[in-house]
Image (spheres, rainbow, N blue to C red):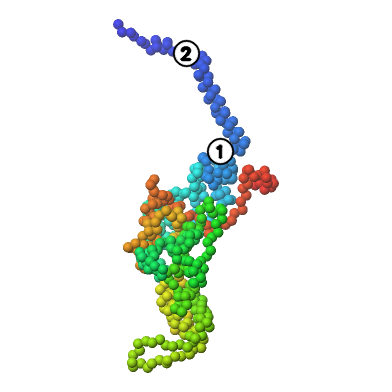
Amino acid sequence: MPRVRTTKALAQRIDLNYFKRPIPLRRWRFWLIVLLPLAAFLWIGWKLTARDFRPYSSGPLSAGHVLLTRECHTCHVAEKNASFELHSSDQACKSCHDGPIHQVKQTSEPACGSCHIEHRGAARLIATSDQSCAQCHGNLQTVAGSTTSYIKTITSLGGDHPEIAVFRDHRKDPSTIRLNHKVHMKKDLLGPHGSVQLQCADCHRQPVTRDAWRFGSAETEAATGAPSPAPAKVMKADLYAPDPGRALMTLPKFAESCSGCHLLQFDKRMPDQVPHDKPEVVHAFVVKKFEAYIAAHPAELREQPEEDRRLPSRPAPPAARVLTPAQWVAEHTKEAEKLLWGKTCRQCHAIDITESQPLPKVAESNYTLHWLPRARFDHDAHRGFACASCHPKAEGPGASTDTADVLIPKIGTCKECHAPGPNHVEARCFECHAYHDWSKRKEVNPTFVPSAMRAQLPSAANPPGQ
């Protein structure tokens, strides 16, 4: 016969005094529930009394603000009607840093903390997200209501970033200096001392480069009268810090880059070269040299015409003629300058020669040093790459033959390396563009005193709350 268990029989097995009897585990659990929160509140109160606010922090500070780890009140300033949670204010940021306005036509100015997010550890505060820029540039508006001079929609480099303006607008290089890259970069280029193979660094260098110029020797300096600037002095601090003079390339100079091959001789009687200078300086130099020469060689005042193949019908020139020193200098100066202005100088410069003016007018070089005025580029950060990898039209079979060609890389070249993903380098907006216009920065009057130095200063020097 099967066993029958009723609900009443099962209920009789329950110990009704179970929760009344003391059990060690339950006792320890009770005291832990009471004591642990109490200890936490006491610890927080102790930290508050010691003015150590790290328990309330969202995370470690960036390297630039690490000194403020115990100085939360420096940035988290209590404001009127503020709650217990105090956010850092723009006023607190600007008490130490001036953040110049981005654009006079901007419709709004974001809060400092919306772009520069703290409490992320060693992350750079300048490393803002593309979303910070796209909140305005994703659909750009101005106070005037028109964006005809700006690209209206830009959200990222890899997405809808436009082409660089100089190519977008089909602009040309405004320089008046005639230069054919293809000719200058070809192999076995004939120079005055034999064949040479030019390199990009022979003309394009960073301002602080201290290596000797291959085609700018001391003899060339003396001959042209245009000495190269002395190399910058190396201070001890420079040995361990990046040099700001390496971002852009300096302008090529004749005495350093060109004079080794392009000689400025003006007369076969003397080895001197005219200075690479204004026509007035060149003219005075030529006159002075001819005056010194004829004073040392007075016999040449009597000129014997060279034999030539004259036509029989032409009258024979006088057998000889005697000139005064002034006449001799004037005639030979005119002859030498005709060669200089019409051939030697005109080979590179745009020169206006008219009969109405005694000396020609040389057009300004009109070099463009910075092709990306709204962006930031550092050649030193790219020094490991061959020049032709970014400037393909500077050398090789497809090299430029026209001075008006702009040889900077297009945006597609930048995107080859700067792109999202683990196998590419930084591609966010801040890498090339700056938000603040630092040319309009204002000096601030800082009031913060580090806690380690407060004991050394009079109490009056310590701002309230510090």
Task: Report the residue at 59% width, 56% height from top.
Answer: 443
Reply above or below: 31 against 322: above
Q: Amino acid at mark 2?
A: Leu
In percent of width and height, residue 179 lies at 40, 68
Name which residue type carries label 1: Arg
Please name the residue shown 51% across and 70% down the image: 222
Please tell me how crowded label 1 is: few (under 14), some (14-19), or many (20+) other residues with Cα within 10 Å: some
Q: Position of residue 270 (x, y in %)?
A: 47, 77
Measure the alpha-carbon separation of dots 2 and 1.
Answer: 50 Å
Q: Quadrant of the N terminus?
A: top left
Residue placed most toward the observer, 315 or 344: 315
What is the count of numbered marks? 2
Residue at coordinates 52% horizontally, 41% vertically from top-left? 60
Q: Residue 360 in the image: x percent, y percent?
A: 46, 79
Q: Residues within 10 Å of mark 2 (few under 14, many from 20)?
A: few
Q: Residue 16 — which label?
A: 2
The quadrant of the image that shows the C terminus is: top right
Residue that sits furthest to the left in the current view: 1
Judge by depth and name the residue closer to the eye, 412 or 1.
412
Quick check: 296 above or below 184?
below
Residue 53 seen in the figure: yes
Give the residue pinned by disc 1: 54
